[in-house]
Amino acid sequence: MQELEYAKYEEIGNWDFSDIKYTVEQDSDWDFYKEIYKYSKPNSLILDLGTGGGEKALLKMPDVGMIIATDFSPKMIETANINKKKYPNKNIKFVTMDNLNMKFPNNLFDIITARHTIIDANQIFNCLSDKGILIIEGVDKYDCWELKELFNRGQAFNDKISISQKDYNDIKNAGFSEINMQEIIQYEYYETEDDLLALLLKTPILDDFSELNPFDNIHKNQFEKDLFNNYVSEHTTDKGIELKRVLYGIVAKK
Ligand SMILES: C[S@@+](CC[C@H](N)C(=O)[O-])C[C@H]1O[C@@H](n2cnc3c(N)ncnc32)[C@H](O)[C@@H]1O
């Protein structure tokens, strides 16, 4: 298990960004939930890995036979069960489970989905039924790259191979027959610097940023604060503070 990540997600306890004000412009048509709709049937059994507080699974997944949604953080699953009360008719069950130690029988699920979370392609392959579909949206190495370069760190900053390429290779080696990968470029525009700061404090885009919250102790963290202000002043546009996101989508058939 990834202990540091686990502790951080336990502390956060939800994956709700509704308080952050921003707009999104996307270059590609690829959409994670549209892909799920495309492959779903009314009786499909879907597994959603690393579901967080179930915010997106509850709101955006199609109505199918059953959705099992898992997360390794019990706090996230607790939040998901609270959120579920707002969707009494959704056939969804939340379960605590590590994506790297999946406890399901072989050949069970019609579709397995994973958005912005770690996966083990071999375990997914085993749990999928024949011709089952894996649908992933991931955050790639070059996501928020200008920000990472400025801070000289961040998620996957020093990785030799991009996260998308690693996932692709792992999925291929696991034995999937058809694999389609798509780069997704998104421009996000944050209304204020507090909105951008809230994103950076909650997500792992910049490692340790929450611990080094530049607004906690101005003297100690003046350097970080200056870097943040630098980014804001260089990326402020009429639409808001621009953040270039680099994501990827993968659809693979067993
Ligand atoms: C970035 S959030 C994404 C949440 C949700 N999929 C979404 O798109 O809104 C990542 C989630 O993956 C979970 N996670 C990270 N590593 C995991 C693992 N090894 N097993 C299960 N869940 C994990 C975290 O607890 C967190 O809830």
Image (cartoon, rainbow, N blue to C red):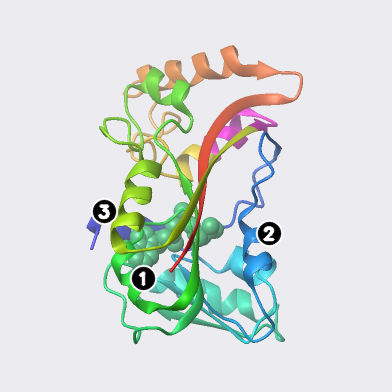
Q: Which amino acid does label 3 sit on?
A: Leu
Which quarter of the picture shows residue 25? top right
Label 2, label 1: how far apart the Cα atoms are: 22 Å
Seen in the image, is 207 located left or right of residue 227?
A: left
Q: In which quarter of the image is residue 10?
A: bottom left
| Residue on which the image places disc 3 | 4
* Magenta-drawn stretch contains 193: yes
Q: In which quarter of the image is ligand 1?
A: bottom left
- Judging by the rendered image, the residue that carries numbered circle 1 is 125
Give the labeled residue for mark 2.
Answer: 34
Label 3 or label 1, whichever comes before in sequence order? 3
Q: Which of marks 2 and 1 is nearer the N terminus?
A: 2
Magenta stretch in the rendered image: 188-198
Q: Residue at x 55, y 34 (%)?
A: 245
Check the image and report above or below for 148 versus 54: above
Work out how far the residue at label 3 is from the one at label 1, CA to CA, in angstroms: 27 Å
Q: Quadrant of residue 99?
A: bottom left
Name the residue rendered at 37%, 22% in the picture.
Answer: 151
Give, as a three-letter code, the residue at label 2.
Answer: Lys
Dot 2 or dot 3: first in sequence order is 3
Dividing the image into 4 quarters, which one contains the C terminus? bottom left
Residue 245 is covered by the magenta coloring: no
Q: Mark 3–mark 1 contact, CB under 8 Å?
A: no
User: Residue at 37% across / 69% down in the picture?
Assistant: 73
C-alpha span from label 2 to label 3: 33 Å
The amino acid type, in three-letter code, at marker 1 is: Phe
As displayed, is residue 195 above or below residue 177? above
Q: Which of marks 2 and 1 is in front?
A: 1
Query: In this rendering, does residue 203 appear at all?
Result: yes
